[in-house]
Image: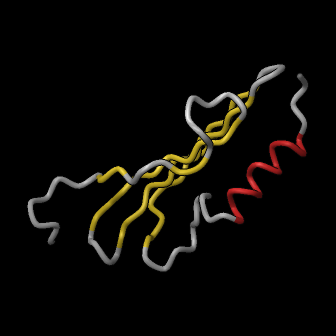
Amino acid sequence: MAIREADILKQLDHHAAGFSFPTLNNLHIDPVDVRLTAYRDDGRWAIAIEHIGYSNRGFTFGNVIYGYGNCLLQGPGGGPSIDLTDWDDNTW
């Protein structure tokens, strides 16, 4: 089965409309780093977007990996936030 650009964009647009897509202009999370990794062959495609941000409400750094594609082990969308800080009380 050939990969069509329209199919990829349809999945990405669907998740953007449903708010399960990285938001880099979130008022409560300041972006620190974002990385996009993409893969494709004749029948499969996958995109991983890693979004590291600083929560200015919780004073923590977190990482969320968003996955999209037609060959994922789990469904597309964002995963859980991974806390990148190791503080007892999350204060400066």
Quarter of the rendering occupied by the N terminus: top right
Along the line of sight, the residue nearer the viewer: 58 or 76: 76
61 over 65 or under it: above or below: below
Please report the residue visible at 34 percent of the width from the left and 76 percent of the height from the top. Answer: 56
Asked if residue 45 lies left or right of residue 90, the reply is: right
Which residue is drawn at the image coordinates 88% and 41% (left, top)?
5
In terms of depth relative to the viewer, which is nearer, 20 or 38? 20
Q: Residue at x 26, y 71 (%)?
A: 59
Residue at 45% across, 51% down: 64
Q: Considering depth in this image, is 43 or 31 the residue closer to the camera?
A: 43
Instruction: Please tell me whether residue 36 is drawn above or below residue 14 in the rendered image.
Output: above
Horizontal relation, residue 40 to residue 76: left or right = right
Residue 72 versus residue 50 in the image, above or below: above
Q: Position of residue 85 (x, y in %)?
A: 23, 55
List x then y, in percent, for residue 77.
Answer: 59, 49
- List x then y, in percent, for residue 14: 74, 57
For the C terminus, the quadrant is bottom left
